[in-house]
Image (cartoon, rainbow, N blue to C red):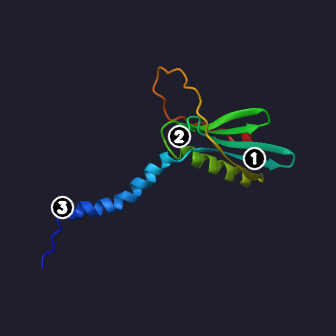
Amino acid sequence: MKRTTSLTTCLINSSKKALPLAIIFASGSAFAIDNMTTVCSHMDKQRKIELVYPENTQTPCEVRYTKGEDTKVLWSASLEAGFCEMKYSDFVKKQEGWGWSCEEMGKEPAVETPEEEPQDEMPEEEVSEESSETTN
């Protein structure tokens, strides 16, 4: 017996599989984006690593590193969701690997900032990485 499947049956089965994924992707915009801060300590020294969402959306985002009074943006992304989260997590792990004790201080709601003047050029994915020797 040859089995045939109607187009309607295929569409229904496909939509059943796609619905959970659509809910997951749509839910990202339904919840607030939270900035994250981790403070790392070693003897009498402290370093602060921040994951910042300046527009309360997944992009743009920045990973900021504070050493004393000096704060630098180590990585930023304007298009790729998940990039800053990965860099933030990896950098915290790297600090711990260097002997620093790191503690997440919690999440703070991202706040919207006034829009900047438009730039002449289309923004590109910005990635800058400080050398390991200068970040400790």
Q: Are marks 3 and 2 in contact (CB under 8 Å)?
A: no
Looking at the picture, which amino acid does disc 2 mark? Thr
Foreground pick, 92 / 13: 13
Q: Position of residue 55 (x, y in %)?
A: 55, 35
**Could you tell me which residue is drawn at 58 percent across and 33 percent down?**
112
Looking at the picture, which amino acid does disc 3 mark? Leu
Left of 86 or right of it: where is 20? left
Mark toward the start of the polypeptide (3 vs 2): 3
Q: Which residue is mark 1?
A: 39
Foreground pick, 132 / 50: 50
- Numbered circle sitting on residue 7: 3
Give the structural element (helix, strand or loop) at label 3: helix
In the image, residue 97 above or below residue 32: below
**Could you tell me which residue is drawn at 35 percent across and 58 percent down?**
18
Give the structural element (helix, strand or loop) at label 1: strand
Foreground pick, 30 / 56: 30
Q: Position of residue 118 (x, y in %)?
A: 50, 21
Mark toward the start of the polypeptide (1 vs 3): 3
Label 1 vs label 3: CA separation? 56 Å
What crowding class fits label 1: few (fewer than 14 Cα within 10 Å), some (14-19), or many (20 or more)? some
- Numbered circle sitting on residue 57: 2
Q: Position of residue 60 (x, y in %)?
A: 53, 36
Left of 22 or right of it: where is 36? right
Can residue 98 be seen here? The reply is no
Q: Are marks 2 and 1 in contact (CB under 8 Å)?
A: no
